């Protein structure tokens, strides 16, 4: 019988490759048997990369904060543990659509924010000396469909026309000559291509490699609740304290 909610952890699921080297101090770890009875400053829902980085930056800014991380299953066992960590900010696509909906400045700001993550990951790995197999390189996208090539080129050139400094800062380089594209990519038959900074890493190891991962109150196997139910549960435990 299929689960009633496919977003929640299911029993006996396959173990992904990215969990073949787990941190023994964090795996199966639970700081307290129950949610803390005393008031806390921040509750982070989920112990994946997003939750861990949120806790990291909060505690870096103010180490005195009381942060509780609630997790429905094991530590960092959800989407973060099932992805290969491709850092590929495709900031040449989507600009024209976002410009229509939100305006040129907001559309560009969104893409600048997206492409900034690679440098932020690299800076974090260096600052915390994290062994997470981070490798910064360049991606080369090749379009073999002429219509898609035209769409990609149009989006890139529209953003470059509106915000040339942002495109230059992001180091996006288009390749419109098919011969040059074949030389750079090693693939024949492409109509248009583009290269830009990219990278890859081991997401679980990045999440586990920071000291802040050990500074939170971690409440593992917390029963999944709606936002309102979780809020009431935390208020209840705080009142009991």
Image (cartoon, helix red, strand yellow):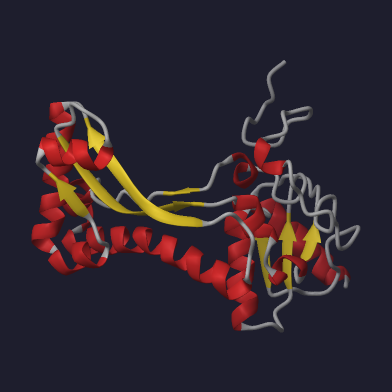
**Is 114 in front, or is 34?**
114
Furthest toward the right, the residue is 33
Give the quadrant of the C terminus. bottom right
Instruction: Please say if 4 is above or below 212.
Output: above
Give the quadrant of residue 128: bottom right
- On the rendered structure, is 122 left or right of 24? left
Instruction: Please say if 48 is above or below 64.
Output: above
Give the quadrant of the N terminus. top right
Whether residue 216 is visible to the viewer of this picture, yes or no, is yes
Where in the figure is residue 222, as x and y percent of width and height? 79, 50
**Is 39 in front, or is 13?**
13
Residue shown at the point (72%, 28%) measured from the top left: 14
**Is 238 in front, or is 73?**
73
Instruction: Please say if 100 is above or below 9.
Output: below
Whether residue 45 is visible to the viewer of this picture, yes or no, is no
Where in the figure is residue 23, as x and y percent of width and height? 78, 54
- On the rendered structure, is 93 left or right of 79? left
Where in the figure is residue 16, as x and y percent of width and height? 67, 35
Residue shown at the point (67%, 37%) measured from the top left: 17
Give the quadrant of residue 78: top right
């Amino acid at each position: 019988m299929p689960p009633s909610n496919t977003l929640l952890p299911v029993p006996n699921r396959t173990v992904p490759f990215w969990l073949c080297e787990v941190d023994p101090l964090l795996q199966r770890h639970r700081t307290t048997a129950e949610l803390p009875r005393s008031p806390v400053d921040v509750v982070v829902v989920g112990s994946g990369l997003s939750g861990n980085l949120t806790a990291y930056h909060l505690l870096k800014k103010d180490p005195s904060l009381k942060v509780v991380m609630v997790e429905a299953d094991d530590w960092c066992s959800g989407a973060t543990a099932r992805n290969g960590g491709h850092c590929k900010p495709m900031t040449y696509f989507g600009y024209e659509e976002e410009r229509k909906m939100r305006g040129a400045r907001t559309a560009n700001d969104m893409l600048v924010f997206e492409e900034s993550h690679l440098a932020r990951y690299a800076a974090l790995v260096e600052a915390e000396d994290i062994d997470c197999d981070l490798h910064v390189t360049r991606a080369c996208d090749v379009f073999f469909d002429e219509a898609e090539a035209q769409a990609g080129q149009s989006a890139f050139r529209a953003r470059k026309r509106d915000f040339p400094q942002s495109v230059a800062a992001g180091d996006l380089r288009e390749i419109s000559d098919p011969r040059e594209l074949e030389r750079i990519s090693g693939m024949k038959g492409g109509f248009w291509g583009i290269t830009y900074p990219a990278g890859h890493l081991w997401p679980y190891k990045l999440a586990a490699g920071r000291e802040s991962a050990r500074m939170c109150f971690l409440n593992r196997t917390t029963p999944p609740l709606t936002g309102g139910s979780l809020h009431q549960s935390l208020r209840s435990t705080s009142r009991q304290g």
